[in-house]
Image (spheres, rainbow, N blue to C red):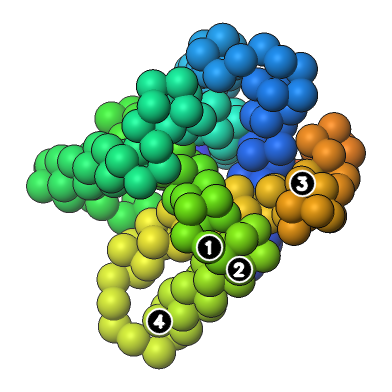
Amino acid sequence: MNKLPQITLLFWIMKIAATTLGETAGDLLSMTLNVGYAVSSIILIAIFLVTLVTQLRSKKYHPLLYWTVILSTSTAGTTMSDFMDRTLGLGYAKGSLVLITILSVIFIYWHFSDHSFSVTEIKTFKVELLYWTAILFSNTLGTALGDFLADNSGLGFEGGATLIGGLLALTALAVFYTRISKTLLFWIAFVLTRPFGATMGDVLTKSPQKGGLGFGTIGSSLVLGAILVVLILYTSAKQNKDIKIAEV
């Protein structure tokens, strides 16, 4: 049984909310609470592993569990990226290149394996493990790219978000008006939504003097968390309704 949600507009809205929350919550732990990037990465990766094992052991799709894993990959990805770029001193550009290489290797291995590369045909343990590994590194890459656009490219927070938003719009148009592989477009969108969430997270948390809205990591995380909870509850209620209709 496929344990993943349907790829709809609501899926992408929830993905952006989760990845933006991952950015603000990761910064809340590592910077606002002054835990540090290394310790934060260890804590959040541990949380990711716990949620991932639970997801892998599950026999069907649970919206709350699925989006908890997505959120944990986002928060872990934020601190992993910051650890590479700042603590290890790689910088945003070199860190992004390293992560692009890792993600490319994952996709190449997956594509040439004996398993389907389609994100709608993830029904075995090995493929699901590849799926979540790709998600973790795509979210980590997205953080590095978002920080690069916001800090080093000269575009600023709003300019970076606008650029990524434009690329996402082009990807959406390609789904409907081109014959490009839907699986390829899914992963392009999945990667792009992370830097979009990262830059949007910066817009929400940074002060107006730095081009942000000044909500801070705590306020932004609370708002985004509430939005995601409401959407998860709606998705769960809709799933239960659909199951009851199917049983009639």
Estimate the x, y position of residue 27 in percent, counting from the top left: 67, 30
Q: Earlier in the sequence, mark 2 or mark 4?
A: 2
Callout 3 touching callout 4 (CB < 8 Å): no
Give how far apart the Cα atoms at labels 3 and 1 are. 16 Å
Q: Which residue is mark 1?
A: 154
Q: Are the two marked residues, 2 and 4, in contact with CB atoms closer than 8 angstroms?
A: no
Amino acid at pointer 3: Lys
Q: Nearer the viewer, mark 2 or mark 1?
A: 1
The answer for how far apart the CA atoms under marks 2 and 1 are is: 8 Å
Q: Are marks 2 and 1 in contact (CB under 8 Å)?
A: yes
Q: Which quadrant is home to the N terminus?
A: top left
Residues under numbered marks 3 and 1 in contact, where contact means CB atoms less than 8 Å apart: no
Q: Nearer the viewer, mark 1 or mark 4?
A: 1
Q: Residue 227's spot in the image, x, y percent?
A: 83, 48
Q: Amino acid at mark 2?
A: Gly
Residue found 37% across the figure and 67% down from its top? 185
Q: Residue 206 bears which disc, if any?
A: 3
Q: Identify the image quadrant of residue 184.
A: bottom left
**Against 116, is 48 above or below?**
above
Give SS at disc 3.
loop
